[in-house]
Structures are given as C-alpha cells and as structure tokens.
Image: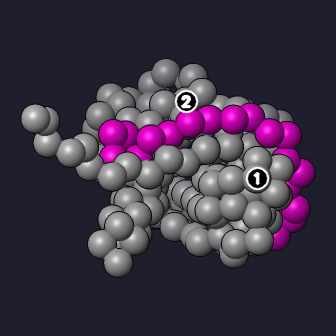
Amino acid sequence: MSAPSAVRHNVNFITGNANKLREVKAILEPAIQVGSQELDLIEIQGTVEEVTLDKCRRAADLIEGPVLVEDTCLCFNALNGLPGPYIKWFLTSLGHEGLNNLLAAYEDKSARAVCTFAYSPGPGHEPLLFQGVTEGRIVPARGPGHFGWDPVFEYEGKTYAEMDKVEKNKISHRFKALEKLQAWFKKEMTS
C-alpha cells in the first residue's frame, strides 16, 4: 500500500505573462499546484498594495474560486519610489536605456524590486498580501532582454537577466513573496 500523498493546495494564478507563470510554478510546485488563467483586469492607480488587493477581489469575483494575483514594482530610490507599480508602462514607453536615463542626473542608482501577491479563496473573502523585496541597483542593460526589466536590475554584481533561472528563483523579490505564501499555506494546513 502506498503512503498517502501530501495535502496540496490549488491556486489559479491570474496572469498573461508566460515568464511569470514559469517562475511561479518553479517556486511553488509541487507543494502548491498552480493553474493559470488570463483575465483582462482593469488596474486602479494607487500603491502596489491597493492595486494588488483590487485586482485580487475582481479576479475572485470573475473566477468564482481561489485566485492568486501579482503586481511587480521597480522602485528607484532617487525618484522616491517611482516608477513603482507603473514600471510596465515606463518600460514599454522608454525601454531599458530610457529607464537608465531617468537616473542620469542622480548619483544614487539604488533600486528595490518589489513583488506583491494577493491570495483569495474566492468571492467575498478579503485577500491576503505576501510581499517580497530585493535591494539592488539600476545598471545599463546586460544579459538577455526577454523578461521585462531583468537586464537593468543588478543584485550582487549580476543582473537578473545574467542569472540562470534557478539562481534567480532563490533570491528574487518574487521568490521572497512566494516563500511567505508557502509558509501561510503550510500554517493553514496544520491549524
């Protein structure tokens, strides 16, 4: 007779970004089974926490079940946290070089990569937030340019783009946030 399998949680990660989905699956599975669905959710303006909570509530209502949503920020310390939750639009408009140009007049090139996940078991439940932060700095683009701003965010001498997936998934802002989510699920299983 085989041993009973461990209790696993299932989440529906709301994303249209294949790179994010791969990273989330690599970090969470097999302990947490990750499904995915793409929804076109309106994003409110506000703090990363406000944006993420609102997206989670909307997604839970649409899916009518457990959802996981994520919002990622890149915060330049010299610009008091901008572009922050608007990094996607800054990157689309300016590119990697333009992101560097934003800091051209400043000595301080330090930045914070912030990842905020919100989980809801379904409609009517207040979402829970899990946030991870990695301190780094903005540098001229290095490494493959296929995943957002990874080529311009440097952590301990390497840009995210220069790291292999396993290395990045052990130190990234996304990993740190998902580590907190995993701990919460584990605690819920033993409660």
Q: Does the magenta stretch include residue 43?
A: yes
| Cα separation between marks 1 and 2 | 25 Å
Residue 45 occupies quadrant: bottom right
Magenta residues, dominant SS class: loop
Q: How many labels does the image show?
A: 2
Q: Which residue is drawn at 29% across and 34% down?
A: 166
How crowded is the residue under tag 1: few (<14 C-alpha within 10 Å), some, or many (20+)? few
Quarter of the image where the N terminus is located: top left
Q: Which residue is drawn at 71% across and 49% down?
A: 87
Q: Mark 2 points at which residue?
A: 19
**Which range is magenta?**
28-46
Q: Residue at x 69, y 53 (%)?
A: 65
Q: Position of residue 177 (x, y in %)?
A: 46, 60
Residue 165 occupies quadrant: top left
> In the rendered view, how is the structure colored?
one colour
In the rendered structure, which amino acid carries the disc numbered 2?
Asn
Residue 146 vs residue 94, the one in the foreground: 146
User: Is residue 107 visible in the rendered structure shown here?
Assistant: no
- Image side of residue 57 versus residue 129, left or right: right
Please, is residue 74 above or below residue 48 in the view? Answer: above
- Mark 1 or 2: the one toward you: 1
Q: Mark 1 points at which residue?
A: 64
